Image (tube, grey):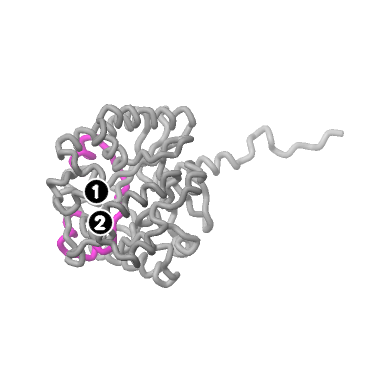
Amino acid sequence: MKRTASLSLDLDNQWSYMKTHGDAGWKDFPSYLDRAVPQILEILERKKLKITFFIVGQDAALDKNHGAIRSIADAGHEIGNHSFSHEPWLHLYSKQEIAAEFERTEDALDAIGVARPVGFRGPGFSLSPMVVEVLGERDYQYDCSTLPTYIAPLARAFFFLKSPNMSSDEREKLRKLYGSFADGMQTLRPHKLAFDLVEIPVTTFPLIKTPIHATYLNYLATISPAIARLYWRSALAACSVTGLDPSFLLHPLDFLSGDDVPDLKFFPGMSLPTGQKLEFIEHVLDKLTQKFEVVTMREHAARYRNETLTASRPSSHSAAEPHRL
């Protein structure tokens, strides 16, 4: 019997990358959802996969994106909350501001007929005790905002290097982007947070804790497709050997190239031609489904709850018996 793997996609839109990058024009909310979403759904349909899409509330609030977002729900995929404004400094928000982010996203999704989310991922893997508190108060079932990796400071430095237009205030807000070196010591396994929330970390390479999400794999593929494929197979093997049920992360740019979105050519992996990228992502998904049963984040959290409940039940051999002297 195959072990479980969850698969999710953060539906970050063009404007959100431009905003974080410090580029002008993001306030017009340019979108590639009409191009990316049909392509993503077509691949998932062929692979017979149902996954979790984390939706940014601002996109759900704009009429031009309603068709793309509705098509995701109509195809049977789970919809999660990815905040309203997609600001990776969510951990700096007050409790009232955090609650407003959740409420606005829930309301925008409800207005287009999408069920209220029960799962959350913070933009830029942003999480704080206050976010957890609001999640609990709003009856969310799970969070998946942690990325246990030792190389977060390097990833942040690379992002700043590629973002020369960013103001000093924005850099200050992003000084914890992707987390810290100490985050690499966090567990890769699902676990309980306060308010009975299940935390499902984004999986990194067991033991060495380097990223294995699709954007990182695409970046490796720009150096060597053979190395990227070997790295991915090795990561999956390490998950199997360590008994880890992985949670794998996708983004829309894993399905697009710099030719598709010229304003985002700065993003890692965007130099790969679209055809090569799609061929590679299909290889990645094929290898994942060969080794694991792929489910939504909600199902992954439910299975973890069932396993922990079963483990906590006393066995028949431990039933109370008369004490023998």
The image shows residue 124 at horizontal and vertical percentages of 36, 54
The image shows residue 266 at horizontal and vertical percentages of 22, 50
Q: 40 above or below 81?
A: above
The image shows residue 136 at horizontal and vertical percentages of 47, 61
Q: Which residues are magenta?
A: 41-68
Q: Quadrant of residue 323?
A: top right
Q: Quadrant of residue 175?
A: bottom left
Dot 2, how many residues are within 10 Å of its Cα: few (below 14), some (14-19), or many (20+)? some
Q: 8 above or below 325?
A: below
Q: Residue at x 87, y 34 (%)?
A: 325
Q: Amino acid at mark 1?
A: Phe
Q: Which residue is mark 2?
A: 17
Q: Give the secondary structure at mark 2.
A: helix
Q: Amino acid at mark 2?
A: Tyr
Asked if disc 2 and disc 1 are in contact, CB closer than 8 Å, the reply is yes
In this view of the protein, can residue 32 be seen by the observer?
Answer: yes
The image shows residue 174 at horizontal and vertical percentages of 37, 60
Q: Give the secondary structure at mark 1.
A: loop
Q: Quadrant of residue 20?
A: bottom left
Q: Nearer the viewer, residue 21 or 48?
A: 21
Q: Is residue 30 left or right of residue 90?
A: left
Q: Which residue is mark 1?
A: 267
